Amino acid sequence: MLQTTILAFLAGALGANATPHFVKGITKEHYPTAFGSSPLINLIGGWILYVITALLVIRADMTSHPAPAFVAASLGVLLMGVFHAHVGAFGRKVPDADGSGDVIGL
């Protein structure tokens, strides 16, 4: 059960982290990553994270312990969501609609 819980948590966190990168990539917007901020890098990075998430879900065998797996995955998603909403990628906030806020590197 411990392996299922840990893998489910990681799957939730990585899947949630994949989303902003994948979305920025397909909308051709810059967004910081460890490898640069170009849309293509974000698209590929998000896709890779989705693939790893799927592999973790398969390996976790979440159907054997559905309740702990669901809670762990949900906490992983929540933790990554709070990270992106509060700290932002690499501590840099995306500008608000009115242009205020820190601008990410282009």
Image: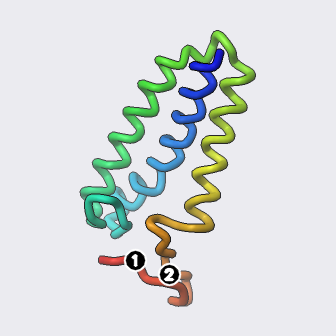
Residue bearing mark 2: 95
40 w.r.t. 104: above or below: above
Residue bearing mark 1: 104
Residue 5, image x and y in percent? 63, 25
Residue 98, image x and y in percent? 56, 89
Residue 93, image x and y in percent? 51, 75
Residue 33 falls left or right of residue 8:
left
The residue located at (25%, 57%) in the rendering is 40
The residue located at (60%, 18%) in the rendering is 62
Quarter of the figure that contains the N terminus = top right
Q: Which of marks 1 and 2 is nearer the N terminus?
A: 2
Q: How far apart are marks 1 and 2 (CA)?
A: 8 Å
Residue 49, image x and y in percent? 39, 41
Residue 65 falls left or right of residue 30:
right
Badge 1, how many Cα within 10 Å: few under 14, some, many 20+?
some
The residue located at (54%, 27%) in the rendering is 7
Dots 1 and 2: beta carbons under 8 Å? yes
Please name the amino acid that badge 2 sits on: Pro
Camera-near label (1 vs 2) is 1
